[in-house]
Amino acid sequence: MDWLRGLCRSSASHAARLSEADDPLSYGCLSRGPDFTQLLRAHLSAAPVLHEGPRSSFPGVKAAAWSPSGTLLAFAGPAGVTVADVDVEEVARYELTNQAAQQLQWSPKSTYVLAQCVSKNDEPNVQVWRRVAGGSYRSELSFHRPKNERGQDLVQWSPDERLCCRLLSDGTIHLSTELTRPPVELPVSHAQACRFSPSGTRLALFTSDTRDSMRHVVAPAQVLILELDADANVISQATSSVKFGQQAELLWSPSSTALLAHCQTEVDDSGKSYYGSSKLLLISHTGKYSLDLSATEKEASDVPVQAVSWSPTREEFILVQGFQPAKVTCWAWDESAQRCSLSAVLLEKAHRNTICWNPFGSIVCVAGFGNLAGEMDFFGGGIEGHNKLKQLATCEAACTVSAEWAPDGRHLLTAVLAPRMRVDNGLHIWCALTGTKVLELSFDELHEVQWRPHPERLPTSRDSCAEELERILNESGARAVAVPRRTAYRPPGARNESAGTVAQMMRGEASQHRPEVLDQAPKTERWPVRSTDSGSSARLSANHRPNQIHGDKLPCPAKGWQYKDPKGNIQGPFSLQQMQEWNAMAVFKPDLPMRCSPDDRFVAFRELFPHPMIPFTSCPRRPT
């Protein structure tokens, strides 16, 4: 346990520093690899600094989880589950079974900690402990839970822990006021998902569709919204039918008055998508209003949903919809009017599949992670005087596997993790206001990284970027965002040269007296070869043989090539090799004045090499 005590002492001293007035922007971070666990401390001030704590030499940690309060840290390893109180350096260690735990979960108020391990048959594989007076833990109960998706809750609680429910393997749901009390079985079957509202008084349920032996839908899926009292009794129920759906993601609005149901199937019956089909519905809590967001006027069938997410503070959500490149839109929910409407189109076409709101709802990151290139767009708004989102910055975090906002709401942490990515593992911290990378740390192999939740008792839990965000949005509406321009493919050998310099030179904006850039000889003969009429190929070189088919008898000179830029300035002389390379990059326009010797007069590029002559390979048609 020395490794854990060291981590606790490091974290405890770090927590003490967090509360000091002279270090208001310092945040803890946990990193985990195949044979280590490490605490980091990031100073996200004007001059960001990342401090590494001691690495534990404790292999086999399968999961680690901070409690919502940020004061407790749970580890799941070969010996069972260990809970550390990082504020007072107390270590409480409890063993589950001889098998290693695979998943951890905390209740919303850090009262319970749950762990799931691998089990045989229907043996109990989920153990629940309750934190009691004095900081110790007591085993409450155990039950069986089939293997579930990583990140899916083992038990659902209302935010105040007043109610809890469990989804059983047979599709039934048990609802109770305490885990240890006899539950009430809700009258539903084939349930696949459940979610308490932020108010804790409503419970949303999703039941899958019914299919025959040919996998055809014979009964639709349903979304149920139950109104509950303090004793877990159902007061009222609203039901909405969904055409199809085998599983669903249920998302409540911050006010608990509207629900987004993202229903999905593993197989697309229409055959248009390899990844199955999806349907998105917005339903009011009363069930009187519903809107199918998957159906559009332009498309005959449902448009696939890439991602959807509510703002944590406002009645609006962002939707990424359509095949890639997808469309990114912002929608607003009006509770009083019972209406949902499109408020803005953020991106018309972009490769995006991820939405990350900061904790305060003032900045959102719309990104393309996973099998996409990692492009990120930051939008700001939602503060007084600036309700609509405006683009702040654009950047790229390639190969990103996970992303999480720092507690300050202005920095985003992205991580390249194994086993999805076996190379370039590490973490990167970005400033959302500028789109710049401020910190990074590389690892040989990294499995997990997560911020320590920021306790609400600390003064830095407020939105520290609100004032700066307001200033940025006030500057001529919003700062101009430099969107990367997509360019044509360039061969690997040409990527070392500055395409911008060539473009500036062709426009007459770059001086001709730059031999180190414009007149350098290539290291290797690397450009594509055009075939002659005889079917043979020849490498391009400055002293090649003259072509005997096209043009006059004089071959292309090895040097002395010049042209006039749009401003009328003469550029050059350049070597034949350089001209060949630029021609391969398609930088010469047909009407560009050019000559191959200072003794010749300028003629249009298309006249110097008329069709079907091969530029800078065939003999030029020099003016007389």
Image (cartoon, helix red, strand yellow):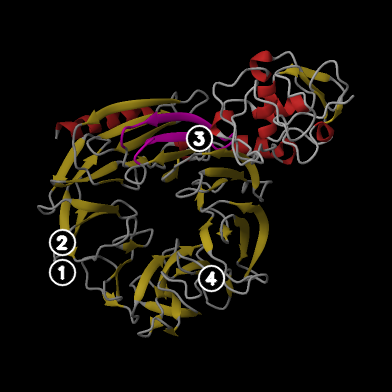
Q: Is residue 208 above or below residue 258?
A: below
| Residue 131 appearing in the image | no
Q: How many marks?
A: 4
Question: Badge 3: few (under 14), some or many (20 or more) residues near its Cα, within 10 Å?
Answer: many
Q: Residues within 10 Å of mark 2 (few under 14, many from 20)?
A: some
Residue at the image point whose x is 62% and y is 28% from the top: 540
Q: Quadrant of the image for the N terminus?
A: top left
User: Which residue type carries mark 4?
Assistant: Leu
Identify residue type, mark 1.
Answer: Asp
Query: Which label was assigned to residue 119?
Result: 2
Q: Which residue is mark 4?
A: 281
In the rendered image, the vertical position of residue 374 relative to residue 138, given as above or below: above
In the rendered image, the residue lying farthest to the left is: 98
Q: Earlier in the sequence, mark 2 or mark 3?
A: 2
Q: Which residue is mark 1?
A: 122
Instruction: Give the mark nearest the N terminus, 1 or 3.
Output: 1
Contact, CB < 8 Å: mark 1 with mark 2?
A: yes
Kindly tell me whether residue 375 is visible in this rendering.
yes
How crowded pointer 4 is (Cα within 10 Å; few <14, some 14-19, many 20+) is rated as: many
Q: Quadrant of the C terminus?
A: top right
Q: Which residue is mark 3?
A: 430
Which segment did they paint magenta?
422-445
Residue type at mark 3 is Trp
Secondary structure of residue under mark 4: strand
Q: Looking at the image, do the residues carrying marks 2 and 3 touch, with CB atoms under 8 Å apart?
A: no
| Residue 244 rendering spot, x and y as whole percentages | 46, 77
